[in-house]
Image (spheres, rainbow, N blue to C red):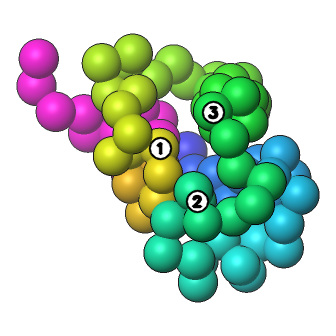
Amino acid sequence: MDRSTVRTTVTEVTAEVLGVDPDILHTTPTLTALPTFNSFRIVEVVERIEERLDVEVDPVELTPDNLTRMDTLTALFERAALGSGTPA
């Protein structure tokens, strides 16, 4: 799996769950600014991405900082999928 696949998957799933155009995700400062964002939906986003990429994110990394912006959400899954996670 490569970085491009991870980025595309994160964008597609997030847009699908939040019901927004994928282009909006990269122009919105935070996902919390979207009217369709809530804690239940972000859980669904994470679960669907994990399933689609066949990875599991370390629960310690499921923080508001990592889950509320596209760049940090994408980086979270890049670490999980590409094995470049931070040391424990």
- Please tell me which residue lies in front, 62 or 38: 38
Q: Residues within 10 Å of mark 3 (few under 14, many from 20)?
A: few
Q: Position of residue 15 (x, y in %)?
A: 79, 59
Asked whether, in this view, residue 72 is left or right of residue 56, the answer is left
Q: Which residue is painted at 73% across and 36% down in the image?
A: 41
User: Which label is found at residue 20?
Assistant: none
Tell me how far mark 1 sits from mark 2, CA to CA. Answer: 8 Å
Q: Position of residue 14 (x, y in %)?
A: 72, 52
User: Which label is found at residue 39?
Assistant: 3
Name the residue that disc number 1 marks.
Answer: 67
Q: Which residue is painted at 57% across and 56% down in the image?
A: 32
- Give the quadrant of the C terminus: top left
Residue interval drawn in magenta: 75-88
Eyeballing the image, is 62 above or below 7? above
Amino acid carrying label 2: it is Leu
Name the residue that disc number 2 marks.
Answer: 31
Amino acid carrying label 3: it is Ser
Q: Which residue is painted at 65% across and 71% down in the image?
A: 25
Q: Secondary structure at mark 2?
A: helix
Place residue 28 in its image quadrant.
Answer: bottom right
Q: Position of residue 68 (x, y in %)?
A: 48, 51
Amino acid carrying label 1: it is Leu
Place residue 47 in its image quadrant.
Answer: top right
Q: Residues within 10 Å of mark 1 (few under 14, many from 20)?
A: many
Q: Earlier in the sequence, mark 3 or mark 1?
A: 3
